[in-house]
Image (spheres, grey):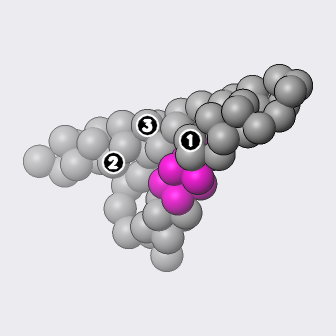
């Protein structure tokens, strides 16, 4: 069920924020502990998750403005 005009449901949005925070915390730890640059993958995935969160936020705002 949709909770609003956004792209994500409320549960998906919470999961996206949790994933973003975990990736943001994991990347510097990996960079410190690992010799290779595999931590960059976490940064790239985190940026994609952040883009989805921003797109959902923009869609929610657009829907809210159209309802007025």
Q: Residue at x 83, y 34 (%)?
A: 34
Q: Closer to the camera, 51 or 34?
A: 34
Q: What element carries label 2?
A: helix
Q: Is mark 1 on a helix, strand or loop?
A: helix
Q: Closer to the camera, 13 or 66?
A: 13
Mark 3 — residue? 54
Q: What element carries label 3?
A: helix
Residue 37 image offset from top left, x and y in percent: 83, 23
Residue 42 visible in this rendered orientation of the protein:
no
Q: Residue at x 57, y 46 (%)?
A: 25
Which marked residue is nearer to the observer: mark 3 or mark 1?
Answer: 1
Choose top left, top right, bottom left or bottom right for residue 3. bottom left
Mark 2 — residue? 60
The answer to whether 60 appears left or right of 36 in the picture is left
Q: Distance from label 3 to label 1 (Cα)?
A: 16 Å
Q: Farthest residue in the left direction?
A: 68
Residue 14 image offset from top left, x and y in percent: 47, 63
């Amino acid at each position: 069920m949709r909770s609003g005009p956004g792209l994500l449901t409320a549960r998906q949005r919470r999961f996206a924020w949790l994933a973003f925070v975990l990736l943001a915390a994991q990347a510097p730890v990996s960079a410190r502990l690992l010799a290779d640059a595999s931590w960059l993958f976490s940064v790239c995935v985190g940026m994609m998750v952040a883009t989805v969160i921003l797109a959902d936020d923009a869609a929610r705002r657009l829907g809210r403005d159209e309802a007025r």
